[in-house]
Amino acid sequence: MRLGLIGLGRIGSFHADTLSRLPAVDSLVVTDVVPETTKAVAERVGAAVADSPEALIRGGVDAIVIAAATNAHTELIRAGVDAGIPVFCEKPLSGDLSEAAAIARYVNDSGIPVQVGYPRRFDPAFSAARAAVESGELGWVHTVRSTTLDPAPAPRGYIETSGGIFRDCSVHDFDTVRWVTGREVVEVYATGSAKGDAFFAEFGDVATAATVLTFDDGATAVVSNTRYNPRGYDVRLELHGTGDSVAAGWSDATPLRNLEPDATWPAGPPATFFMDRLASAFHAELDAFTAVVAGQRTSPCTVDDALAVAVIAEAATLSLQQHRPVQINEVRPS
Ligand SMILES: NC(=O)c1ccc[n+]([C@@H]2O[C@H](COP(=O)([O-])OP(=O)(O)OC[C@H]3O[C@@H](n4cnc5c(N)ncnc54)[C@H](O)[C@@H]3O)[C@@H](O)[C@H]2O)c1
């Protein structure tokens, strides 16, 4: 199959490498608004160049992968859907909830398969956690803890268009806890701090956040995020139930210094970059997308999943601003 890749920044450039190595991908065509970036990535991975997303789609591709900045996602999804080809789009659908709801409706009405990029769904330990819930071996899961700690903030320009920490970073945790437990969130309480680079406060964003989610069965999740964790890129999940307790993201690469006197774990070196920590998940995610394009499976992360996560992020943003618990029904688009 011939795939088109739109947006070649941090993640797009990484996806270019992965896509060029996938067995199902015969050829790749790439584009970015910055022509030098397009040229450099195309040369590196042996891809063809298109001058614009429109030219890329017009040139004839079997599907597109969107890794452009968040504020370009809905327009590019619409372009793929209008061309009648499957779309993979990086999270989030949009920085704006009503725009996310509109594009989800548009996709659902079209019947075109769209997969949204939540790579933890393809991490072996996170998948095993989900299987443990489904099998019943954990009993009633009453407590979930989900953590995403970035070593350092992304550049100012990225933060400016990211939609804020809940829509940009915490969404990975929100998707994980919803997917792993199979439960819907009904209430959100979030707090946070802008301490760090001045641009967080300038954009009305926070650099560190804690969110408490209440599920429809009364269970609770605690989500923890920061842009300042220089020890490493820390992605962990804990599930505690009446039958057992399990964890994902605990390995010798877990970026924590264990202060127990006799501890030999974690032995290190710590994971420092999300692309290293989740490399196999990103590969499996795009491999799954080629199966979606080939009609061999349905989307493993639909626009409805992404919209449910966007609603949680909206509730968290409102909760932080108003310093109160927010019911999901208050923010759910009609
Ligand atoms: N799933 C994940 O774990 C994950 C990780 C990182 C980023 N992301 C998402 O991927 C997206 C990109 O993030 P990034 O870190 O690579 O950002 P980035 O700023 O490094 O790169 C964005 C690129 O998109 C290009 N671009 C912007 N608008 C475009 C358009 N209309 N057409 C073509 N190219 C366009 C920019 O020139 C830039 O090269 C964001 O939406 C982000 O949320 C997801």
Image (spheres, rainbow, N blue to C red):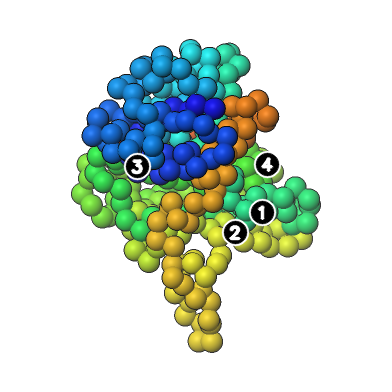
**Residues under labels 3 and 2: Cα distance?**
34 Å
> In screen coordinates, is 75 left or right of 244?
left
- Tell me which numbered mark, 3 or 2, is placed earlier along the sequence: 3
Q: Residues within 10 Å of mark 1 (few under 14, many from 20)?
A: many
* Rendered residue at 54%/27% (across/down): 1
The residue most toward the bottom is 262
**Residues under labels 1 and 3: Cα distance?**
37 Å
**Residues under labels 4 and 1: Cα distance?**
11 Å
Which mark lies nearer to you, 3 or 4?
A: 3
Name the quarter where the C terminus is drawn: top right
> In screen coordinates, is 190 left or right of 321?
right
- Tell me which numbered mark, 4 or 1, is placed earlier along the sequence: 1
**Residues under labels 3 and 4: Cα distance?**
41 Å
* Rendered residue at 45%/56% (across/down): 276
Q: Disc 3 marks which residue?
A: 44
Q: Disc 4 marks which residue?
A: 182
* C-beta proximity under 8 Å, tags 2 and 1: yes
Return the x and y of residue 296 as percentages of the image width and height: 68, 29
- Tell me which numbered mark, 2 or 1, is placed earlier along the sequence: 1
| Residue 113, placed above or below residue 187 | above
| Residue 113, placed above or below residue 325 | above
Which mark lies nearer to you, 1 or 3?
A: 3
- Tell me which numbered mark, 3 or 4, is placed earlier along the sequence: 3
Residue 152 visible, this orientation: yes
* Rendered residue at 65%/50% (across/down): 127
318 vs 73, nearest the viewer: 73
Q: Disc 4 on helix, strand or loop?
A: loop
* C-beta proximity under 8 Å, tags 1 and 3: no
Q: Disc 2 marks which residue?
A: 248
Q: Disc 1 marks which residue?
A: 129
| Amino acid on which disc 4 is placed | Gly
Return the x and y of residue 95 as percentages of the image width and height: 39, 31
